Amino acid sequence: MGAETYPLLRGLHITCVGLSLGLFLLRGWWQWRGSPLRSSAWARLVPHVNDTLLLLAGIGLALMLRQYPFVAPWLTAKLVGLLLHIGLGIAALRNWLPGRLAGMAWCGSVAAFGYVVGVALTRDPWLGAGG
């Protein structure tokens, strides 16, 4: 992958980030409203396809930039935030938790997503809070 590939890969990554958040918010809304759309085939498939593309683009960018988790603190923070987002999101959307706890997990997952985006934009795991 050459330097000309970077803008395309970055664009794909950013597009997938937006789609990922939009789809997650939509699925949370459907969950909260008890909509049958939340269990439709496309609602179960499309987010996973998008998130796979997002992850692959992220790995490609890390390789191109020679920035690696557990070496670059900001990328380690992104990875930890991503795992928190995934864990809380799964708990919230798969009915593992009762009402309010599921809502809190969902909000925590959105907050973790925001943290990951903040770290990506600043390359600072502390987001300017010192450390």
Image (cartoon, grey):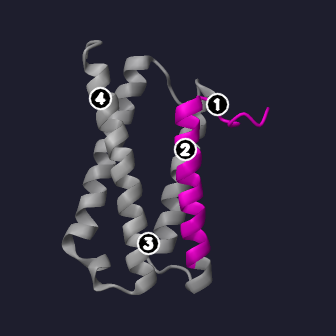
Q: Which mark is residue 116?
A: 2
User: Considering only order in the chain, which callout, 4 or 1, is on the residue closer to the N terminus?
Assistant: 4
Residue 131 shows in this picture: no
Going by the picture, which residue comes out furthest to the left? 41
Q: Main secondary structure of the magenta part?
A: helix
User: Considering only order in the chain, which callout, 1 or 3, is on the residue closer to the N terminus?
Assistant: 3
What is the spatial separation of the Cα atoms under label 2 and label 4, in whole angstroms?
Answer: 18 Å
Q: Secondary structure at mark 2?
A: helix
Would you say the residues marked 4 and 3 are in contact, meaning their CB atoms lie under 8 Å apart?
no
Q: Which span of residues is magenta-colored?
A: 102-131
Going by the picture, which residue comes out furthest to the top? 3
Residue type of the residue flagged with mark 2: Val
- Judged left or right of residue 129, residue 120 is left
Q: Secondary structure at mark 4?
A: helix
User: Considering only order in the chain, which callout, 3 or 4, is on the residue closer to the N terminus?
Assistant: 4
Residue type of the residue flagged with mark 3: Gly
From the image, tell me which residue sits under label 4: 9
Q: Which mark is residue 124?
A: 1
